[in-house]
Image: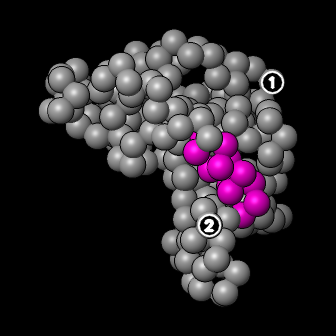
Amino acid sequence: MQILRWAKSRGCDVTAEVTPHHLLLTDELAESYDPIYKVNPPLRTAEDVHALREALADGTIDCVATDHAPHPIEAKETEWSNAAMGMVGLETALSVVQRTMVDTGLLDWAGVAERMSATPARIGRLPGHGRPIAVGEPANITLYDTDTDREVDPAVLVSKSGNTPYRGMRVPGRVIATLLRGRPTVLDGKIQ
């Protein structure tokens, strides 16, 4: 984080991202050698997790990227040394960000929208994405219920894989719908 802060303070054109799992999970989980926790970069200490949260909150880290990595069962249900790196995270990303950033007071929802939509669209040079809703314009939007919680069940994930480190964990919120260019892509949690 120090190098990023130094570079940004000197006007260098540099960006950084963090994954939801690096905002929540620590290296203590990897001590079990359960391949579900094998990711690159590896999970780090609680102190590092706190530093990542602070850096996302203060803008040192620009955005959240899921690093969604679905793997077949045999690629994760093997010994640690042979296991594939990565985990699924797309369907739980907003819930983990709510838990680690919003519920802790580090970011408000406008900050979440900035770091998970507007800034990634700007960095990726994606015109028409990450912009505010405007009358007469097709909407790119996610409708999210912040007042519910759910238990993560790999069997109901839409991903082609169930390699989630959040199996059985209660997480806040639930995506109700998404629209892309005004057309529904998810309704009531189901892909359209």
In which image quadrant can residue 116 be found? bottom right
Quarter of the image where the N terminus is located: bottom right
Q: Mark 2 or mark 1: which comes first in sequence?
A: 2
Residue occupying image coordinates x 83% and y 64%: 135
Of helix, strand and loop, which one carries label 2? Answer: helix
User: At which x and y percent is residue 177?
Assistant: 64, 37
User: At which x and y percent is residue 3?
Assistant: 57, 71
Residue occupied by mark 1: 147
Q: Say which of 13 and 173 sits in front.
A: 13
Magenta stretch mostly in which secondary structure?
helix
Q: Are marks 2 and 1 in contact (CB under 8 Å)?
A: no
Residue occupying image coordinates x 40% and y 15%: 155
Rendered position, 19 above or below 190: below
User: At which x and y percent is residue 150?
Assistant: 64, 16
- The three-letter code of the residue at mark 2 reads Gln
Q: Based on the picture, tell me whether residue 51 belongs to the magenta stretch.
A: yes
Judged by depth in the image, the label closer to the viewer, 2 or 1, is 2
As drawn, the label of residue 2 is 2
Q: What stretch of residues is rendered in magenta?
A: 48-59
Q: How many marks?
A: 2
User: At which x and y percent is residue 75?
Assistant: 19, 30
Q: Say which of 136 and 93 sits in front.
A: 93
Of helix, strand and loop, which one carries label 1? Answer: strand
As drawn, the label of residue 53 is none
| CA distance separating discs 2 and 1 | 36 Å
